[in-house]
Amino acid sequence: MSNQLSRRKLITTGFAAVAGVAGLATASRVAEHYGLIPPDSGGIWGPGATLNYAAQRMLMSHHSLAREFNRSDVSKVTPVSGLAPKNEIYDRLQRGNFAEWRLKIDGLVARPGLFSLEEIKRMPPRTQITHQACEEGWSFISEWQGVPLAHVLHTVGISPRARYAVFYALDDAWDSLDLPDAYHPQTFLTYGMNGADLSNDHGAPLRLRVARQLGYKSLKFLNRITLTDGLKHVGNGKGSISPDLGYSWYAGI
Amino acid sequence: MADSTYVAMPASQPAEAQDSPRHSAVVRLTHWIFTLSFFGLVVSGFAIILAHPRFYWGETGGKGGPSLFDLPLPTMLGGPSGWGRSLHFQSAWLAVIAGSLYIVSGVLTRHFRNDLLPARAELSPGSLREILLHHIRFKKPADDQSYNVLQRLSYLGVVFVVFPLMILTGFAMSPAITSVFPWLVVMFGGHQSARTIHFFAASFLLLFLIVHITMVILAGFTSRMRAMITGRIHPGKVES
């Protein structure tokens, strides 16, 4: 009797194991299909990063908006993490008030091109007063002026094959957003902060603003945006410079 | 299933059934998974604090502004907060999975109601005073099967008050989650208030851990460890 029971236990365990593996494989296929797997899902921190991203993408499927504040809530102290780049190109550009600077948009778009700061400022401007938290723990509230990235993407006409927008900066940093965040109404290309031009340390001439993620996703000193259908062949293949520095690609936290 | 009666019949002897385990298999399993994840959370939490060992009240706060208090720790920018954050979330997921299993099983098996909910008589001032005096005099607790009222209250408080507070203040610091549930952060009075409460609740849990381990040692380290590993207080009987 105990023999039969243990054989049964063995068979049941075997079935459970096979079902478990098949279930996991199916779950990962389904998750991949619905865009729930982040580019840095490999490695030892992959499980946590993937669960964070998948759980929050499902939670935010109705394109929730980050909280907005009043002008009276704007912080007097606005710390920075990482100063303006110290290289010849940036020096020359900022001496000329960024008149020579261009934003290059290419990749899977119908009308690739170069945009001057003046052209970007002529696009329909928007402002947001939002909270920005650094992964270190500090935070501030600012009013940001810029153009919604969605407007810029409509202008260049992105291909139906595009799945990510990759951003490059004058300080050699780079990062990327999936389309739900790229098209989010609070994702801006900003050129102004608290009523003035963006300061160099805050990311002049153009800074990405991603209201539903930590500050490090709001890449500064932009000079190029590329639309791609995947991130495996971009840079380190993990979607951003952050995983190389120990930080996750997705920073909705 | 023709032979499903095998499963329905109790496999153990009647004598063994009477000597039921002190801790159920689910409690033991989740206890040790939770131990692992709690260790990960404490180590990584400390690593995260090192990036900015200052605390604030309200929505915002940072370098160059006033703080509520500063911890006497070095500020390690670019230090361990990268892997710290990754370890924190990986451990948190493990803790939430183990914790959910523990809570669902505790409700279904009536573990909370039968073993942790204090009887009304135990909550009378007289009986509370008596048990407090017992503890203050470091009297070795009786080796009985049930928890005393102080244990019941502290376990219930940690499971149903402090851990939910940790999770909610953690959520309140996520710009993605608060975009869906803004009341989470409003309820705590702002992003930085939530961070500060998260720190105090974590400190309280560390204090609880120290008391917990001290009590285990005082009550008999070997027998309590055996109880949490094999389910039995006494050696020689391994739970089937």
Image (cartoon, grey):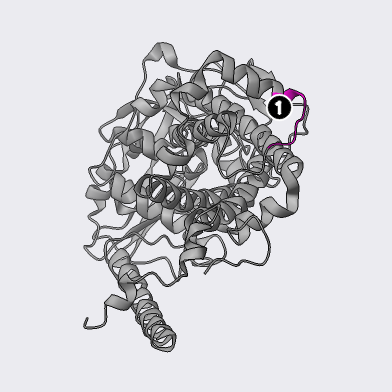
Answer few, some or many: residues within 10 Å of disc 1's Cα (few below 14, many 20 plus, some between 14 and 19).
some
Q: Is residue A14 magenta?
A: no
Of residues B145 and A91, the one drawn nearer to the viewer in this rendering: B145
Residue drawn at 51 percent across, 49 percent down: B95
Position of A192 relative to A224 (above/below):
above
Between B7 and A58, the residue placed more toward the observer is: B7
The span picked out in magenta is B134-141
Task: Locate the N terminus of chain B by quadrant.
Answer: bottom left
| Residue B123 in the figure: left or right of residue A84 | left
Residue B72 picture location, percent across and down: 78, 27
- Give yes or no for residue B140 being in the magenta stretch: yes
Which residue is depicted at the point 57% across and 64% down?
A44
Q: Secondary structure at mark 1?
A: helix
Where does the image place residue B93, in percent across and percent down from the top left? 48, 51
Query: Can I make out residue B130 in this image?
Result: yes
Q: How many marks?
A: 1
Farthest residue, direction front? B15
Please name the residue shown 77% across and 31% down the image.
B73
Q: Position of residue B205 (x, y in %)?
A: 61, 34
Amino acid carrying mark 1 in the image:
His
Which residue is found at the position 39% from the left and 14% from the top?
A71
**Relative to the observer, which residue lies in front, B58 or B34?**
B34
Marked residue chain, label 1: B
Residue B240, image x and y in percent?
52, 69
Q: Which residue is mark 1?
A: B135
